[in-house]
Image (cartoon, rainbow, N blue to C red):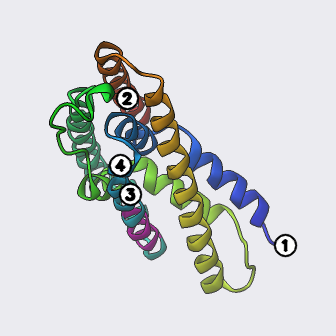
Amino acid sequence: MSELGPFILAFTALVMSPGPATLLIAATSAAFGWRRALPLVVGLLGSMVVIMVLVGAGLAEWVLGNPGVAAIGSGFALVYMVYLAYRIATAPPVSARTTEPVQAPPGFRSGFALNFVNPKAYAAVGAAFTGFSIVPRDPLTDVGVKCALSIGLIALGHTLWLAVGETIARFVRSPRSGRALNVAFAACLLVSLVALAA
């Protein structure tokens, strides 16, 4: 029997829940505007496609099962997330978007790189792909349907997080509160990393 419904529910919960990627999207959207955050989203989507291929080929299982490789990945994730949090915290306040020179937001390369150092991305795809059967007795079609559904759900989730960041930014009027918003999002990114490592 097809497990399409449970797969969609489980994967939707994974991509909608706060985590390093979703919080970075909301933070970038709030600090720089949703249009300037789109390259980041495209990068995140691109790396998820590659991760799905790695999971399908069994390479992700080797990475997650090898303590040395996993530790190196976690170390890179820590350093990279601290760097991205710094970029968000030091971005010009939302209210200054049109009056001050704006630094470049995290873009395609940041998004593409983030998922590769995010163990949650491998684990989420691995759990979703091995835990459900959408097209029984046809493994190739099953994987193809899961990939297509996953990318669609991830794109939907990322779009919603873009909207969350932009909506929050609309209520920020003063440079002081804009700076506080950027710092709060940066702190959330760091907290999500601690939770991921726990």
Mark 2 closeness class: few <14, some 14–19, many ≥20 residues within 10 Å: few
Vertical position of residue 18 compared to residue 133: above or below: above
Of the residues under marks 1 and 2, which one precedes in the sequence? 1
Mark 1 highlights which residue?
1
Q: Residue at x 38, y 57 (%)?
A: 44
Of the residues under marks 3 and 1, which one precedes in the sequence? 1
Disc 3 residue type (three-letter): Leu
Disc 4 residue type (three-letter): Ala
Mark 4 closeness class: few <14, some 14–19, many ≥20 residues within 10 Å: many
- The number of callouts visible is 4
Q: Nearer the viewer, mark 4 or mark 2?
A: 4
Q: Are marks 3 and 1 in contact (CB under 8 Å)?
A: no
Q: Quadrant of residue 61?
A: bottom left
> 39 and 137: which one is in front?
39
Identify the element where label 2 is drawn. helix
Of the residues under marks 4 and 2, which one precedes in the sequence? 4
The disc at residue 194 is 2
Magenta stretch: give its range: 47-55
| Mark pair 1, 4: CA separation | 40 Å
The disc at residue 37 is 4
x and y, in percent, of residue 164 in the image? 52, 37
Identify the element where label 4 is drawn. helix
Disc 1 residue type (three-letter): Met
Vertical position of residue 79 compared to residue 3: above or below: above
Of the residues under marks 1 and 4, which one precedes in the sequence? 1
Identify the element where label 3 is drawn. helix
Q: Quadrant of residue 42?
A: bottom left
Mark 3 highlights which residue?
44
| Mark pair 3, 1: CA separation | 32 Å
Of the residues under marks 3 and 2, which one precedes in the sequence? 3
x and y, in percent, of residue 105 in the image? 25, 44
Q: Residue furthest right?
A: 1
